[in-house]
Image: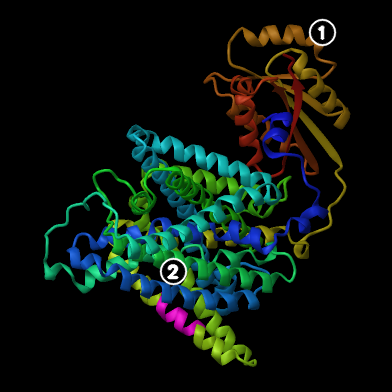
Amino acid sequence: MSSSLKRLLLGKPIPTESQNRDQMRKHTALAVFSSDALSSVAYATEAILAVLIIGSTFALGLSLPISLAIAALLVIVGFSYRQTIQAYPGGGGAYIVARENLGVVPGLVAAGALLVDYVLTVAVSISAGVAAITSLAGALGYPGLREYGVGLALLFIATITLLNLRGIRDKGFLFSLPTYIFVLSILGMIAYALIRYFIVGAPDLPPPASIDPPVNAELISVWLILRAFAAGCTALTGIEAISDNVQDFKPPAARNAANTLTVMIVLLVTMFLGVTYLANLYGVTPNSVTNETVLSQLARGVFGIGPIYVLLQVATALILVLAANTGYADFPRLAFFLARDRFLPRQLANRGERLVFSNGILVLGIAAALLVVLFQANPIALLPLYTLGVFTSFTLSQLGMVRRNLRTQTNGSERAALISGIGALLSGVVLVMLVLTKFIHGAWLVIIVIPILVLGFQVIARHYTRVAEQLSLTTAVRPQPIRRLTAVVLVSGVHKGMLPALELGRALAPDNVTAVYVNLEPDQGMRIKARWEEWGCDVPLVVLDSPYRSLVTPVLKYVQEIEGRYRDDQVMVILPEFIPSRWWEHLLHNQTGLLLRAALMFRAGKTVISVPYKLER
């Protein structure tokens, strides 16, 4: 990427001393870190109804009690996370809490679960946003837009990845406006719909999707209710985001983050219960024929197809797309903590020119794009994989807080431990329910991926530990001066590109430099020798015959022979290298050099030097 294009897309670099200036006020942080949780209103009720619809008309009426139970769980987990914010104002969330209080392995399990969940957050949010757009297009008479769902989803992922690469200061307003429009639209729809219903009555809506069978008490089982409850727990996704990003709040960060979390919980519970109640009141169910969302059906029934309906659908689509920002805010931050602790590549701990964790953002964008393509941007197909990771982290985080509160023995610690204990118990029960009810629907994949990630974390940590031990100066011997240098210049022919390499060899080892040419063709060696007398710069040339046309083997054999001549010798292998002027020209040059460099670098005691020669356009 050229420098000018990079500046156009990402903006000017931000100096390190400006880092704290990007901390957010509460109203901006609410939009940025709560968009995932608040946007779950668009699909949580529908997820419950999509399960209950296989039962009977009576079963659909259970959606409100199930939603009330989910709302109670949401409040308990939210209060528990308030304690986490106060106890860990540096952020880090479930990973830090579980690692410090339960041990390294539970911490890594929580981290792996959250990393998976953040990737799914992006994929589900983007896919649900595309579903809202196609529902709007279908209602306006353009059903063909559904065919371009995957392309739209990939375009949105690319856009939001770019926005996050630019940094917080450029996206705060962008995230605030759609979030607050969505919240006001949903609250306004709930209030207007209730007033209209009790004054005018319910509007005429399309008949619900078919229910098999009409009434069957056997299908209204505990298993069906548990499945519906587990499906509706998608409403809890994203509520941990604020505790993961306390450092991004303006001081006093912990208090501001806790207050923002409370506001988010109140808004989420109100909107979630309101939408579920309206769906019961108006008899709205998932429509398998038109694939129109429940929220779209509600808005169309309440407002009709007009400006207000279009505004609500656009706001829904925007917040669902932008809700992916929770993943972009949390995945790179969690990857930073893991990289800092040597459980992920250290490149993920580095901030880019815009003071964001650029590498983590790019990894997340690529992973989410792969999921979208794999599941064809279908949010219903992705939902069974969702929530399992977040409830794993919920459970471990709350257990960690229980142990911390019991260990600290401060004023109010017992009450705090009780709240966290209730949260841990309920989260654990829900986690078991999710495993049982969603296993055959795709949750098995998450159950396999999380242990693989934990194993990968441990392998990376052991590697960094071994590297640190080998680089430690405790067992080092002070280096002795190099008594003799031997320079071997590998040449592919007599041309201008080899001359800088020869000059470097003469400068480093003026009395012990040799040029080496591997003769692959019978007549080529003679021609090279003839031209070398004129352009060889008084450097002796050794021509290695290769009857089997191997390039690497004769060079390695010759270098090994040079090494055996002296015990106090340092052998340097110098490779001339062409630097093309266009990116695609790299495919046409230096392939042989790459093979030689790879072969030489893996042999101890070698110094390999590349001497570039810039090609002009």
Q: Position of residue 80 (x, y in %)?
A: 53, 78
Left or right: residue 22 versus residue 370 is right
Vertical comparison of 390 with 147: above or below:
below
Left or right: residue 373 versus residue 527 is left
Q: Position of residue 97 (x, y in %)?
A: 58, 74
- Residue labelled with disc 2: 391
Element on which disc 1 rests: helix
Q: How is the image coloured?
A: rainbow
**Type of residue at label 1?**
Glu
Q: In the image shown, does 394 or 82 lie closer to the viewer?
A: 82
Magenta-highlighted residues: 420-427
For image coordinates 50% across by 84% down, the residue present is: 419
Element on which disc 2 rests: helix
- Give the overall secondary structure of the magenta segment: helix
- Residue labelled with disc 1: 534
For image coordinates 76% across by 20% down, the residue present is: 614
Q: Position of residue 356 (x, y in %)?
A: 68, 51
Pick the quarter of the image with the C terminus.
top right
Q: Of circles 1 and 2, which is in front?
A: 2
Q: Position of residue 121 (x, y in %)?
A: 47, 55
- Say whether residue 323 is magenta: no
